[in-house]
């Protein structure tokens, strides 16, 4: 913890223990976000046993600590949202605390992260945090920043994301995305119940990931990811308000996932239609952002020229 108590960095969770063992345990590579959702759903359904909630939080805490320890390519810092620090300030603080992870640093713009040791669902809304990440690789850091700001799933970077992968494409996507990007994206979301993505996005992302694993003939992992996608889609209505359209899409996506588990042949999946619309929306958003950015640059250039002329005329 830094002076003033505002910044919680890579070591904020301390040593995590598995219940009853007294020793730090190596935990299986499961979806860390599941423990967070489990604790929230437990409270929503009327659970009042503090011991049960505490055990869930300990497990959640241990999984986060395990992820931080295992992935040495990045480091993290959480900042309570009650502070008024700007992203540039937080990035500078991070650079001083973690000089080995400064090839690329960025702070998520919307925050809303919740940590296991501070979440107290029944009494009051838990403390929320913004998340700053630093990377050893500038390439990975820039990809993560770009993809984490998009409303589409991360596998939509492909030119035709709704077509089947060739073997060569699958191997390339695994080396770039599966090994290096997906674990960090999972970590980022392990402390977020909701975000600015469409309600279906997380499920679509996992179904794309399952498709990649299937092309690589990683059958057991594929089945695990599809089951995670089903669970993710099933709990979305409990985590946020959704429209009738989104509810229908969730049902169709769950049907797709069940089809895949049953081994049914590939067909036109519903996520392809959702993603086509999302691609158009992201394209329009990107063009709008670029227009505003260029407009600001032109105005600044005109202002500089006027200032130079005024000086020359004096």
Image (cartoon, helix red, strand yellow):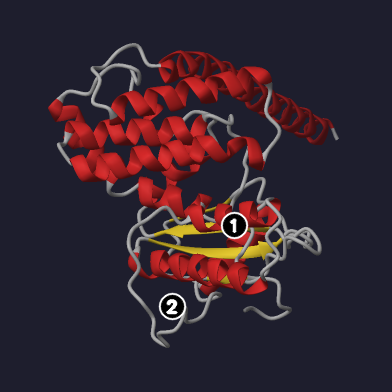
| Rendering quarter of residue 67 | bottom left
**Label located before the other in sequence (1 or 2):** 2
Say above or below: 43 vs 227.
Answer: below
Label 1 vs label 2, nearer the camera: 2
Picture coordinates of residue 86, whole percent (x, y) = 71, 55
To which residue does mark 2 refer?
18
What count of labels does the image hold? 2
Q: Of helix, strand and loop, which one carries label 1?
A: strand
For the N terminus, the quadrant is bottom right
- Callout 2 environment at 10 Å: few (<14), some (14 to 19), or many (20+)? some
- Callout 1 environment at 10 Å: few (<14), some (14 to 19), or many (20+)? many
Residue furthest to the bottom: 22
Q: Is residue 99 left or right of residue 37?
A: left
Q: Which of these two is toward me, 26 or 133?
A: 26
Can the viewer see residue 193 in this picture?
yes
How far apart marks 1 and 2 lie (CA) works out to 26 Å
Say above or below: 99 vs 158.
Answer: below
Can the viewer see residue 176 in this picture?
no
Q: Of helix, strand and loop, which one carries label 2?
A: loop
Picture coordinates of residue 162, whole percent (x, y) = 35, 18
Q: Which of these two is toward me, 243 or 113?
A: 243
For the C terminus, the quadrant is top right
Residue furthest to the right: 314
| Rendering quarter of residue 23 | bottom left
Q: Residue at x 33, y 23 (%)?
A: 259
To which residue does mark 1 refer?
131
């Amino acid at each position: 913890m830094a002076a003033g108590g505002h910044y919680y960095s890579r070591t904020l969770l301390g040593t995590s223990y598995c219940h009853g063992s007294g020793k730090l345990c190596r935990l299986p590579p499961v979806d860390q976000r599941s423990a967070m959702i489990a604790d929230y759903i437990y409270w929503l359904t009327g659970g009042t046993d503090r011991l049960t909630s505490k055990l869930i939080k300990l497990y959640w805490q241990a999984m986060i600590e395990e992820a931080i320890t295992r992935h040495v390519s990045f480091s993290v810092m959480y900042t309570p949202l009650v502070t008024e620090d700007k992203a540039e300030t937080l990035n500078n603080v991070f650079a001083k605390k973690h000089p080995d992870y400064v090839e690329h640093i960025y702070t998520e713009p919307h925050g809303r992260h919740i940590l296991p040791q501070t979440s107290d669902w029944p009494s009051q809304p838990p403390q929320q945090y913004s998340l700053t990440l630093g990377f050893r690789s500038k390439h990975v850091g820039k990809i993560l920043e770009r993809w984490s700001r998009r409303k589409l799933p991360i596998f939509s970077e492909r030119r035709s994301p709704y077509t089947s992968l060739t073997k060569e494409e699958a191997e390339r996507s695994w080396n770039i995305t599966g090994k290096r990007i997906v674990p960090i994206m999972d970590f980022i979301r392990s402390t977020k119940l909701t975000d600015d993505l469409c309600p279906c996005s997380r499920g679509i992302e996992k179904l794309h990931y399952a498709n990649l694993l299937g092309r690589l003939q990683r059958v057991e992992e594929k089945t695990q990811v599809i089951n995670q996608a089903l669970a993710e889609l099933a709990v979305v209505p409990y985590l946020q308000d959704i429209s009738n359209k989104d509810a229908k899409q969730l049902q169709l996506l769950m049907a797709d996932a069940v089809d895949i588990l049953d081994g049914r042949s590939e067909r036109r999946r519903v996520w392809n239609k959702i993603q086509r619309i999302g691609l158009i929306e992201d394209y329009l958003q990107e063009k709008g952002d670029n227009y505003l950015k260029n407009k600001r640059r032109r105005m600044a250039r005109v202002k500089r020229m006027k200032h130079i002329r005024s000086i020359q005329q004096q």
